[in-house]
Image (tube, rainbow, N blue to C red):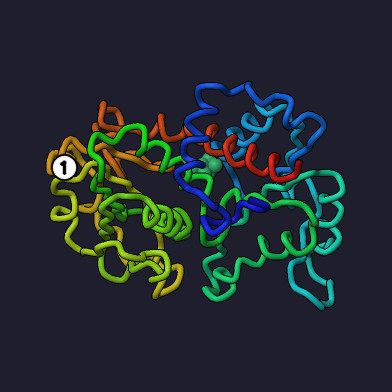
Amino acid sequence: MTNFTSISDVTDLNALIHEGLYVKKHPFADQALGKNKTIGLIFFNSSLRTRLSTQKAAQNLGMNVMIMNVGQDSWGLEMEEGIIMNADKAEHVKEAAAVIGRYCDMIGIRAFAELKDREKDYREQVLTQFQKYAGVPIVNLESATRHPLQSLADCITIEEFKVKRRPKVVLTWLPHFKPLPQAVANSFCEWMNHMDVELVVTHPQGYELAPEFVGHALVTHNQNEAFEGADFIYGKNWSSYTHYGQVLTQDPTWMVTMDKLRLTDNGKFMHCLPVRRNMKVTDEVLDSPQSLVIEQAANREWSAQAVLKTLLHGME
Ligand code: CP
């Protein structure tokens, strides 16, 4: 693996999941591997889990970590090629990525979808420009269309908590008043399509995800039917892909409640966090033993460590 931008960079998913489970048991076994290596974590957007778990994972591997919030700690970065830079962005990504690539042995980038221009977002301009100009491995810390470190943590969590060989996994849309990107939902589908699970996606009409991410999942607008017999319920809000970036409904009946969880086969509730309580999912669900959200967030450390370890091995 020379970059980690999507599941396409992963040669053996099962091995990577088991690497995550291994480093969870032996977090400091590879302290020498990252000695004198530096990772730069570059954030265009806010973060709690991604920032702290990736920093911790890198430190577990003996790496140095530098973190920068673009536009707050640094100059605003221009991504367009050949543009006259007479607006608010003082530095071009050509120089910025190349310079950061001289200071760092690998670079993590977080840059969300702007949700204004679908074609532009789905082109992954920021990630692509850093890959083009940095000259070092790039780690996706959540891009416009994907969140692979989250998806790997989700795979690790499902592997740990499944009680059936082929569990039923349901991705359900949740109500929210703000337009949110499709990245987590896209990525979750993409990774689950590579797992031995029965994948069902449920959402109101108008919230169809891009077909290339949905893959072989069964799609239904009937949430209750989807929940029947499920082993894992993965909740997430996303804005419309077809009516790009729009909030088409905030229908509160899509919120996950204990009554809905009772339709499952003692199903576990998952969410990438942050989550708005009693808007997307009730207190009762989040505070119940069926909620895996803290375990899932804890596994972000091991998913990041498995990825950074694999990238460091690739640099040997
Ligand atoms: N799930 C996740 O990526 O959390 P943060 O946005 O806090 O990093």
Seen in the picture, residue 4 relative to 116 is either above or below; the reply is above
Seen in the picture, residue 61 relative to 109 is either above or below; the reply is above
Q: How many labels were placed on the picture?
A: 1
Q: Is mark 1 within 8 Å of ligand 1?
A: no
**Camera-side residue: 296 or 312?**
312
Residue at the (50%, 22%) spot, across then down: 25
Q: Position of residue 44 (x, y in %)?
A: 66, 52
Describe the element under mark 1 as helix, strand or loop. loop
**Camera-side residue: 310 or 213?**
310
Q: Position of residue 148 (x, y in %)?
A: 52, 50
Q: Within 10 angstroms of label 1, few (less than 14), some, or many (20 or more) residues?
A: many
Residue at the (72%, 64%) spot, across then down: 129
Q: Position of residue 114 (x, y in %)?
A: 57, 64
Seen in the picture, residue 241 relative to 35 is either above or below; the reply is below
Residue at the (60%, 45%) spot, across then down: 46
In the picture, measured across the screen, residue 26 lies left or right of residue 133, that is left
In the picture, measured across the screen, residue 280 lies left or right of residue 224, that is right
Quadrant in which residue 249 is drawn: bottom left
Quadrant in which residue 163 is drawn: top left
Residue hosting label 1: 264
Q: Quadrant of the C terminus?
A: top right
**Camera-side residue: 10 or 296?**
10
Q: Position of residue 204 (x, y in %)?
A: 25, 64
Give the residue type that dot 1 points to: Thr
Residue at the (27%, 42%) spot, across then down: 232
Work out whether residue 177 can be spotted: no
Quadrant in which residue 270 is drawn: top left
**Camera-side residue: 204 or 305?**
305
Work out whether residue 301 can be spotted: yes
